[in-house]
Amino acid sequence: KKMAEDLSALLEKLSLKPEPFILQPKFWEDEGGGDVPGNCAPLLNRNNACLATEAAANKAILEQTAKWPSLCGADKVTSLPVVQPVKGAGTSESILWRDAERTFKTEPYQQQMIKVLELVADGDYHQGMGYLTGFLLLLVPPGD
């Protein structure tokens, strides 16, 4: 319970939404459904109708992804370690911003991705971290 309170406070401070992106009210409207490349977020270009724009259609996948934190021990985390900032963090020159722009098409989702990456990228950032974070944000609440 303490972990949930600590992470909830952190998420509130960072203005992160508590639910996965695909459940956020304007996500599909803002980012596109993934069926028409060029009209959707780059990350969704390879969706191939795996994720649906209707929340009910994603119920089974969300039930499975809800188990992921406990499978990797993340449900036992009580605090996040202090990390060294990534070079240029907080600026538009940051690799985090550039990767967010290559992952999502609208700024609210890009900013949420950047905030999560700033919590976990420990000075030595690799592009794969952004892609994995973007994918996880589609399906898992940021606090998990």
Image (tube, rainbow, N blue to C red):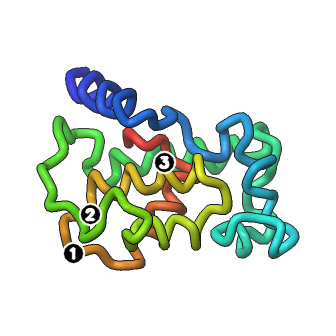
Element at badge 2? loop
Q: Which quadrant holds residue 91?
A: bottom left
Question: Could you say which disc has been placed on residue 124 in the image?
Answer: 1
Q: Earlier in the sequence, mark 3 or mark 1?
A: 3
**Residue 126 horizontal/vertical position (percent):** 33, 78
| Amino acid at pointer 1 | Asp
Q: Residue at x 42, y 56 (%)?
A: 114
Q: Does the residue at mark 1 contact the one at mark 2 (Cβ under 8 Å)?
A: yes
Image x and y of residue 90, in percent: 34, 56
Element on which disc 3 rests? helix
Q: Secondary structure at mark 1?
A: loop
Please state the horizontal and vertical placement of residue 111, each as a whole percent of the image. 49, 51
Total numbered badges shown on the rendered structure: 3
Check the image and report above or below for 13 versus 48: above
Toward the viewer: 112 or 88?
Answer: 88
State the residue in front, 83 or 71.
83
Q: CA distance from mark 1 to mark 2?
A: 7 Å
The picture quadrant where one finds residue 94 is bottom left
Q: Quadrant of the N terminus?
A: top left
Q: Which residue bears the numbered disc 2?
A: 121
The residue type indicated by label 3 comes to Gln
Residue linked to disc 3:
112
Look at 20% across and 41% down and name the residue there. Answer: 77
Residue at the location (34% across, 27% down)? 8
Q: Amino acid at mark 2?
A: Ala
